[in-house]
Image (cartoon, helix red, strand yellow):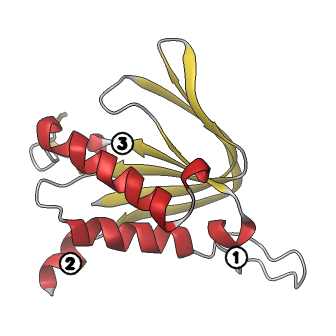
Amino acid sequence: MRAVVQRVASATVEVEGSIVSSIGPGLLVLLGLHESDLEADADYICRKVLNMRLFPNDETGKTWDHSVVQKNYEVLLVSQFTLYGILKGNKPDFHVAMPPEKAKPFYVSVVEKFQKAYKQDAVKDGIFGAKMKVNLVNDGPVTASRLSTTIKMRLK
Protein backbone atom coordinates (compact mmCIF):
# COMPACT_ATOMS: atom_id res chain seq x y z
CA MET A 1 0.00 0.00 0.00
CA ARG A 2 1.23 3.47 -0.85
CA ALA A 3 0.00 6.80 0.37
CA VAL A 4 0.87 10.31 -0.68
CA VAL A 5 -0.17 12.59 2.17
CA GLN A 6 -0.64 16.32 1.67
CA ARG A 7 -1.40 18.89 4.35
CA VAL A 8 -4.22 21.03 3.00
CA ALA A 9 -6.16 24.14 3.92
CA SER A 10 -9.06 22.55 1.99
CA ALA A 11 -9.74 19.86 -0.60
CA THR A 12 -12.66 18.66 -2.72
CA VAL A 13 -13.47 15.74 -4.98
CA GLU A 14 -15.65 16.40 -7.99
CA VAL A 15 -17.31 13.73 -10.14
CA GLU A 16 -19.25 14.61 -13.29
CA GLY A 17 -19.40 18.29 -12.33
CA SER A 18 -20.64 17.75 -8.76
CA ILE A 19 -18.66 17.98 -5.55
CA VAL A 20 -19.02 14.60 -3.85
CA SER A 21 -16.71 15.23 -0.92
CA SER A 22 -14.92 18.13 0.72
CA ILE A 23 -12.83 18.96 3.77
CA GLY A 24 -11.46 22.04 5.44
CA PRO A 25 -8.02 21.97 7.05
CA GLY A 26 -6.49 18.51 7.28
CA LEU A 27 -4.92 15.81 5.13
CA LEU A 28 -5.56 14.72 1.57
CA VAL A 29 -4.41 11.10 1.23
CA LEU A 30 -3.95 9.54 -2.21
CA LEU A 31 -4.07 5.80 -1.56
CA GLY A 32 -2.70 3.10 -3.88
CA LEU A 33 -3.44 -0.57 -3.21
CA HIS A 34 -0.93 -3.27 -4.14
CA GLU A 35 -2.15 -6.69 -5.29
CA SER A 36 -0.65 -8.32 -2.18
CA ASP A 37 -1.88 -5.84 0.44
CA LEU A 38 -3.26 -7.25 3.66
CA GLU A 39 -5.24 -5.95 6.61
CA ALA A 40 -1.92 -5.34 8.41
CA ASP A 41 -0.92 -2.90 5.66
CA ALA A 42 -4.15 -0.96 6.15
CA ASP A 43 -3.59 -0.90 9.92
CA TYR A 44 -0.09 0.49 9.44
CA ILE A 45 -1.12 3.22 6.97
CA CYS A 46 -4.09 4.24 9.12
CA ARG A 47 -1.96 4.49 12.26
CA LYS A 48 0.85 6.37 10.49
CA VAL A 49 -1.39 8.88 8.70
CA LEU A 50 -3.48 9.71 11.75
CA ASN A 51 -0.39 10.15 13.95
CA MET A 52 1.95 11.99 11.54
CA ARG A 53 3.07 15.25 13.12
CA LEU A 54 2.58 17.55 10.16
CA PHE A 55 0.90 20.49 11.90
CA PRO A 56 2.27 23.32 14.06
CA ASN A 57 1.57 23.68 17.75
CA ASP A 58 0.18 27.19 18.07
CA GLU A 59 0.88 27.33 21.82
CA THR A 60 4.57 26.32 21.76
CA GLY A 61 5.47 27.48 18.26
CA LYS A 62 6.87 24.04 17.37
CA THR A 63 6.43 23.50 13.64
CA TRP A 64 6.06 19.70 13.38
CA ASP A 65 4.25 18.91 16.62
CA HIS A 66 0.59 17.99 16.11
CA SER A 67 -1.26 15.30 14.19
CA VAL A 68 -4.51 15.72 12.29
CA VAL A 69 -6.27 14.10 15.28
CA GLN A 70 -4.72 16.51 17.80
CA LYS A 71 -5.79 19.46 15.66
CA ASN A 72 -9.29 17.98 15.22
CA TYR A 73 -8.96 18.39 11.44
CA GLU A 74 -10.34 16.25 8.61
CA VAL A 75 -9.01 13.54 6.31
CA LEU A 76 -9.95 13.03 2.66
CA LEU A 77 -9.03 9.61 1.23
CA VAL A 78 -8.84 9.17 -2.54
CA SER A 79 -8.20 5.80 -4.18
CA GLN A 80 -5.41 6.10 -6.76
CA PHE A 81 -4.22 2.88 -8.41
CA THR A 82 -1.74 4.87 -10.52
CA LEU A 83 0.58 5.05 -7.50
CA TYR A 84 1.58 1.52 -8.57
CA GLY A 85 2.23 2.44 -12.19
CA ILE A 86 5.47 1.18 -13.73
CA LEU A 87 6.72 2.66 -16.99
CA LYS A 88 7.29 0.08 -19.71
CA GLY A 89 8.79 2.15 -22.46
CA ASN A 90 6.57 5.22 -22.57
CA LYS A 91 3.37 3.52 -21.42
CA PRO A 92 2.37 2.99 -17.79
CA ASP A 93 1.65 -0.55 -16.61
CA PHE A 94 -0.50 -1.11 -13.53
CA HIS A 95 -0.22 -4.90 -13.19
CA VAL A 96 0.95 -4.75 -9.55
CA ALA A 97 -2.01 -2.61 -8.47
CA MET A 98 -4.80 -4.51 -6.77
CA PRO A 99 -7.46 -5.52 -9.36
CA PRO A 100 -10.65 -3.42 -9.12
CA GLU A 101 -12.93 -6.29 -8.07
CA LYS A 102 -10.70 -6.95 -5.04
CA ALA A 103 -9.63 -3.33 -4.51
CA LYS A 104 -13.10 -1.82 -4.09
CA PRO A 105 -14.14 -3.80 -0.97
CA PHE A 106 -10.60 -3.48 0.43
CA TYR A 107 -10.63 0.29 -0.10
CA VAL A 108 -14.05 0.54 1.58
CA SER A 109 -12.63 -1.34 4.58
CA VAL A 110 -9.66 1.07 4.72
CA VAL A 111 -12.03 4.07 4.79
CA GLU A 112 -14.02 2.40 7.58
CA LYS A 113 -10.80 1.67 9.47
CA PHE A 114 -9.86 5.38 9.36
CA GLN A 115 -13.37 6.36 10.48
CA LYS A 116 -13.30 3.96 13.44
CA ALA A 117 -9.76 4.96 14.45
CA TYR A 118 -10.57 8.69 14.35
CA LYS A 119 -14.18 9.78 13.92
CA GLN A 120 -16.63 8.95 11.18
CA ASP A 121 -17.67 12.47 10.21
CA ALA A 122 -14.04 13.69 9.95
CA VAL A 123 -12.96 11.05 7.39
CA LYS A 124 -14.30 11.44 3.87
CA ASP A 125 -13.51 9.83 0.52
CA GLY A 126 -14.00 10.08 -3.20
CA ILE A 127 -15.91 7.59 -5.35
CA PHE A 128 -13.96 4.43 -6.07
CA GLY A 129 -13.36 3.88 -9.78
CA ALA A 130 -14.84 7.20 -10.84
CA LYS A 131 -13.02 9.80 -12.90
CA MET A 132 -12.42 12.39 -10.21
CA LYS A 133 -11.19 15.95 -10.18
CA VAL A 134 -9.31 16.44 -6.94
CA ASN A 135 -8.89 20.09 -5.99
CA LEU A 136 -6.75 21.18 -3.09
CA VAL A 137 -5.27 24.20 -1.44
CA ASN A 138 -1.91 22.90 -0.29
CA ASP A 139 -0.86 24.20 3.13
CA GLY A 140 2.87 24.81 3.33
CA PRO A 141 3.21 23.06 0.94
CA VAL A 142 3.72 19.91 2.98
CA THR A 143 3.77 16.50 1.30
CA ALA A 144 4.76 13.16 2.81
CA SER A 145 5.61 11.39 -0.40
CA ARG A 146 5.01 7.70 -0.88
CA LEU A 147 4.46 6.38 2.61
CA SER A 148 4.66 2.68 1.78
CA THR A 149 4.01 -0.63 3.51
CA THR A 150 4.67 -3.15 0.77
CA ILE A 151 8.39 -3.60 1.38
CA LYS A 152 8.37 -3.08 5.15
CA MET A 153 5.53 -5.46 5.85
CA ARG A 154 6.83 -8.22 3.54
CA LEU A 155 10.26 -8.31 5.17
CA LYS A 156 8.89 -9.24 8.60
- Above-or-below relation of 19 to 90: above
Of pointers 2 and 3, the one earlier in the residue sequence? 3
Secondary structure of residue under mark 2: helix
Of pointers 1 and 2, the one earlier in the residue sequence? 1
Percent x, y of residue 25? 72, 51
Percent x, y of residue 27? 59, 55
Secondary structure of residue under mark 3: strand
Quarter of image, res 114: bottom left
Query: Which residue is located at x 70 percent, y 76 percent?
Result: 66
| Left or right relative to 91: residue 44 | right
Query: Image quadrant for the C terminus?
Result: bottom left
- Disc number for residue 66: 1
| Residue closest to the eye, 118 or 136 | 118
Q: Are marks 1 and 2 in contact (CB under 8 Å)?
A: no
Percent x, y of residue 40? 24, 72
Q: Residues within 10 Å of mark 1 (few under 14, many from 20)?
A: some
Q: Residue 136: in sight, yes or no?
A: no
Q: Are marks 1 and 3 in contact (CB under 8 Å)?
A: no
Residue position for label 3: 79
Query: Which residue is located at x 14 percent, y 84 percent?
Result: 155
Of pointers 1 and 3, the one earlier in the residue sequence? 1
Residue position for label 2: 153
| Left or right relative to 68: residue 32 | left
Give the Cα distance between marks 2 and 3: 20 Å
Query: Which residue is located at x 45 percent, y 35 percent?
Result: 126
